[in-house]
Amino acid sequence: MSQKSLYDFETEQIDKMFDCKNYLFKNSKHEKVILESDTGVKMVRHIIYKPADVSVYQRLALINNPYLCRIYEISESTEAYTIYEEFCDGMTLTDYANGETLAEHDALNITCSICQGLYALHNSGIVHRDIKPDNIIICDDNNVKIIDFDISKIYKSNQRSDTQTLGTVGFAAPEQFGMQQSDARTDLYSLAVLLNVLLTGEHPSVKMCENKKILKVIKKCLSINPDDRYSTAEELYNVLNKIRRKLKYEKMS
């Protein structure tokens, strides 16, 4: 299960060379702590107490994508799994927007980056299930990172519905409430809500964006029937990127 970390350290070395700087949270099921070395290198130690299913994290450890929080190493003891994760230095998209609406081009840049992260995630059979501004980090270098895979799941073709009702109300797709199994299109529904919030400051049920081309995309993603949505994050990216490029051209002309 253990995988070589980005910093070329084994688990024991990590614990020796990194000090606990700040608890992100702690409860009876798991805890997250920010670790920092003498040289200023930071990472997150995520302890998940047994019984637990860490199959999502095992798959994530095999993915190296600039738009996903990296999983460096996973170790196992008799009581828990310890996962060493990338520390994404920056602010959540919630804090970045700070209650204000974003310009269309900025909102599309962020959404297209999320699409690229989701494409890698979905190609590995993982459904995030909690895409929302709090789970998107705008890093100090302006890169976009998807974080928090605690309720993510591996898609199973023979499963009719999710075994648990999970997700954030307002962002979760209808199928997350027992209608059928979550899949890649579930994340696209949530991403459309996020895009609308960035553009209007409101949930789509309250106010929809005014740009007709973007509105058409959002409405398609928000279809009750997943079959009526875009099929993949790549397909959604291509549509949004085309709109983004046209906006850029119009701004330059």
Image: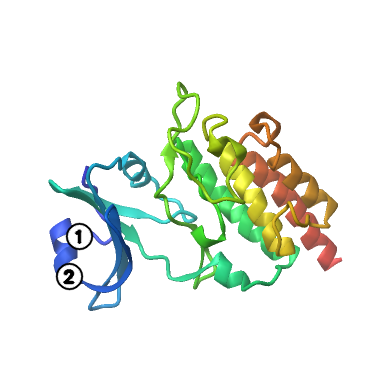
Give the mark toward the camera: 1 or 2.
2
Residue 247, image x, y percentages: 79, 59
Residue at x 58%, y 39% (from the top left corner): 186
Quarter of the image with the N terminus is: top left
Marks 1 & 2, CB-CB < 8 Å contact: yes
Residue at x 67%, y 56% (from the top left corner): 195
Q: CA distance from mark 1 to mark 2?
A: 9 Å
* Relative depth, front residue between 111 and 82: 82
Name the quadrant containing residue 11: bottom left
Please determine whether, in this image, residue 193 is positioned above or below residue 99.
above
Please determine whether, in this image, residue 159 is positioned above or below residue 56.
above
* Relative depth, front residue between 66 and 131: 131
Q: Please tell me how many numbered marks the rendered image carries.
A: 2
Residue 86, image x, y percentages: 36, 61
* Circle 1 residues within 10 Å: few <14, some 14–19, many ≥20: some
Name the quadrant containing residue 36: bottom left
* Circle 2 residues within 10 Å: few <14, some 14–19, many ≥20: few
Residue 156, image x, y percentages: 44, 27
- Which amino acid type is shown beneath numbered disc 2? Met
Residue at x 30%, y 40% (from the top left corner): 53
Element class at badge 2? helix
Query: Which residue is tagged 1?
Result: 9
Residue 30, image x, y percentages: 29, 55
Residue at x 52%, y 35% (from the top left corner): 182
Specify the farthest residue to the top: 158
Q: Is residue 68 left or right of residue 206?
A: left
Q: Which numbered disc, 1 or 2, marks the residue that appears first in the sequence? A: 1
Element class at badge 1? loop
Quarter of the image with the C terminus is: bottom right
Query: Which residue is tagged 2?
Result: 17
